[in-house]
Amino acid sequence: MTVHPVYLDYSATTPVDPRVVDKMVPWLYDHYGNPASRSHSFGWEAEEAVEQARADVAALVNADPREIVWTSGATESNNLSIKGAAHFYAERGKHVITLKTEHKAVLDPCRELEREGYEVTYLDVMENGLVDLEVLKAAIRPDTVLVSIMFVNNEIGVIQPIEAIGEICRDKGIIFHVDAAQATGKVEIDLQKLKVDLMSFCAHKTYGPKGIGALYIRRKPRVRIEAQMHGGGHERGFRSGTLATHQIVGMGESFRLAKLEMKTENERIRMLRDRLWKGISEIEEVYLNGDLESRVPHNLNVSFNYVEGESLIMAVKELAVSSGSACTSASLEPSYVLRALGRNDELAHSSIRFTLGRFTTEEEIDFAVDLLKRRVDKLRDMSPLWEMVKEGVDLDSVQWAAH
Amino acid sequence: MAYSEKVLDHYENPRNVGAFDKSEENVGTGMVGAPACGDVMKLQIRVGDDGRIEDARFKTYGCGSAIASSSLVTEWVKGKSLDEALEIKNSAIAEELALPPVKIHCSILAEDAIKAAVKDYKDKHGS
């Protein structure tokens, strides 16, 4: 049996809470009905379970259950929102605004819109990772139909000023979509208060199963989108396809638990995160990426200067961490999110994202700090850059042979 | 990314890490790569009176494959004449370490590091 490393990659995905698994299992064994079956009790009980889950998801974000549509995950919700809204409102205009630091599941649908002839503005963020509201206002044009800005950034955990952005968009009659995949259970979301028109959710970042998500579509004022998936007219025509009862039940339960426990859980996680940062900041030449105040307690993104990120991740193989988003870790490019913060290539290359969660313990944090200190030392002993810095060489003055 | 056994071995037990005094007459130093690209390799060779490389040291800032490539070449250059060392090709390094295609540049960098170290030594000796 292999011993697993300490899991500090909760923003890639979370383990499914055992209480959620227990709730899901009966819907695979005895209660296997299709929620769309109207002619027998198998269908009726499945439909009831699906509606209970819808109510639980809606409750976490203070929405009406009728505003929640099931999807396969946040990627689908983002696609449905961005392409669906842009297509529906195409006659009003063909300009979309988003951020350079968005997840690929937002950026790639925007690229697709560009191929279809839309114009997309990708806004820079400030050095702390947050959008500058004045920059956003200045980017709005008469033909802007959609703004898509994430609630919580997946790499650096910063919380964007969603309430203020909502006011700006509503004032101009622009549809506002928010990717909240990383936000549920971490920040309070009140859709009665926030002027958000579309919001994407998924279960697997909040201790639910993978493969299930939801999209919030505002009813008042009514927001329209064009469906992407046709066939059967499920989910009021917004998203056809047989509902995955067990997955939906799992998402509902995970969101119900999040609502109940998030307050105390976030305090505990914040303590652990602060303990991790205190330990790491004792190492020379480390830099925190992104704002520390407007940030979820689960995230710490740190650059270890003069140490290359991939080799550092290899050096701390007793920790399951990532150098950025799991979706881009196949590429050798430094994080585009850190580049957008104005971090130089070296610092962007040497970053590690630590994300903590429900099952992280103090012992694990202490273990991680001790290990990092030793391994960063080892790699710096091996680093020609560190050697030069210690000799007093200014690395910016060196003529590098770029390759 | 899954690394080969050999990369992991060199990465975990790097051979010949360290530095010689680069002002020494019989030491050649080569530094290649750039921090912005994510790899910098420094390779040093110490050449004996018989013209053969008697020892080598490296320091590398880079991914596991870059560290393994440089560790490997410090072993390979030892005992070779300068001309023999120049014959070490990146393809042989990549093959020995079973580098995946996205990591071939690490082996190219290691080959360049040998060339740069030999050139530095030759420049010092005016040949």
Image (spheres, helix red, strand yellow):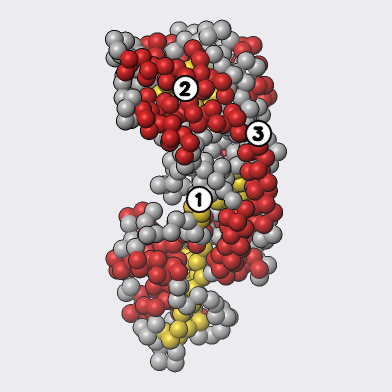
Mark 3 and mark 2 lie on one chain; the one further toward the N terminus is 2
Tag in front: 1 or 2: 2
Query: Is the residue under label 2 in contact with that under label 1 (CB below 8 Å)?
Result: no
Left or right placement of residue A287 versus residue B26 in this view? right
Image coordinates for residue A214, horizontal then vertical, percent: 46, 23
Dividing the picture into quadrants, the one containing residue A304 is bottom right
Front one among B40 and A260: A260
The residue indicated by pointer 3 is: A263
Quarter in which the C terminus of chain A is drawn: bottom left
Q: Residues within 10 Å of mark 2 (few under 14, many from 20)?
A: many
At a point 38% along the width and 33% down the height, the residue shown is A25
> Dot 1 falls on which chain?
A
Dividing the picture into quadrants, the one containing residue B90 is bottom left
- The Cα atoms of the two marked residues, 3 and 2, are separated by 21 Å
The residue indicated by pointer 1 is: A7
At a point 54% along the width and 24% down the height, the residue shown is A178
Image coordinates for residue A213, horizontal then vertical, percent: 44, 27
Mark 1 and mark 2 lie on one chain; the one further toward the N terminus is 1
Mark 3 belongs to which amino acid? Lys
Left or right placement of residue A106 versus residue A196 in this view? left
Mark 2 belongs to which amino acid? Ala
Task: Give the label on residue A53, or none.
Answer: 2
> Dot 3 falls on which chain?
A
Tag in front: 1 or 3: 3
Mark 1 belongs to which amino acid? Tyr
Image coordinates for residue A341, horizontal then vertical, percent: 61, 40
> Dot 2 falls on which chain?
A
Q: Residues within 10 Å of mark 1 (few under 14, many from 20)?
A: some
